[in-house]
Image (cartoon, rainbow, N blue to C red):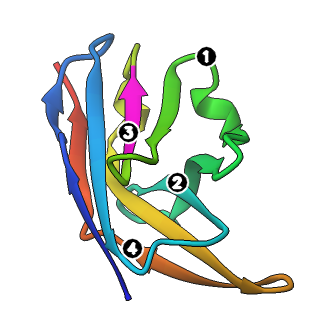
Amino acid sequence: QVQLVESGGGLVQPGGSLRLSCAASGFIGGPSAMGWYRQAPGAERELVALITTTASTNYADSVKGRFTIRRDGAKNALYLEMNSLQPEDTAVYYCNFRKYVGGTNYRDYWGQGTQITVSS
């Protein structure tokens, strides 16, 4: 099992910045990827940013140039630096740990989610 605990959400004005953190514990060894997803009201959960154990990253087009994902292997932590936040970034943000269990098979673990609201 893997446990994920997020922190850092809140209310921010348009153009502002926030940093999300995710602390991972449990069986986190081996090949994996960690990422941030978000879900706005009435919408499906979508990928925001992802980083692998080899530090390869992938970002949603809507956040490229504004958000930066970073993984600290020593601390088993994941971060998301968010700049130039806009109202359309308002959503519940979830930390994800994807553990590869052989071939293309994987198992997803999720944090409890943290709300980010961008509003003046």
Query: Residue 41: percent from the left, percent from the top?
Result: 35, 60
Q: Under tag 1, what secondary structure?
A: loop
Residue count near mark 1 (Cα–Cα under 10 Å), binned few <14, some 14–19, many ≥20: few
How much space separates mark 1 and mark 2, taking CA atoms?
17 Å
How much space separates mark 1 and mark 3, taking CA atoms?
16 Å
Answer with left or right where residue 15 lies relative to residue 35.
Answer: left
> Which residue, as the protein is rendered here, is positioned at the far front?
74
> Which of labels 4 and 3 is toward the front?
3
Q: Under tag 3, what secondary structure?
A: strand
Which residue is label 3 attached to? Answer: 79
Which residue is at the front of the view, 52 or 69?
52
How much space separates mark 4 and mark 1, taking CA atoms?
25 Å
Query: Residue 93: percent from the left, percent from the top?
Result: 35, 53
> Which of labels 1 and 3 is toward the front?
3
Looking at the rendering, in which quadrant would you find the C terminus? Answer: top left
Specify the amino acid type for callout 4: Trp
Tell me which residue sits at (28%, 43%) in the image: 21
Numbered range of the magenta stretch: 78-82
Specify the amino acid type for callout 1: Gly
Which residue is label 4 attached to? Answer: 110
Q: Under tag 4, what secondary structure?
A: strand
Specify the amino acid type for callout 3: Tyr
How much space separates mark 4 and mark 3, taking CA atoms?
15 Å
How much space separates mark 4 and mark 2, taking CA atoms?
10 Å
- Asked if the residues shown at circle 4 and circle 2 are in contact, with their CB atoms under 8 angstroms apart, the answer is no
Question: Residue 35: which disc?
Answer: 2
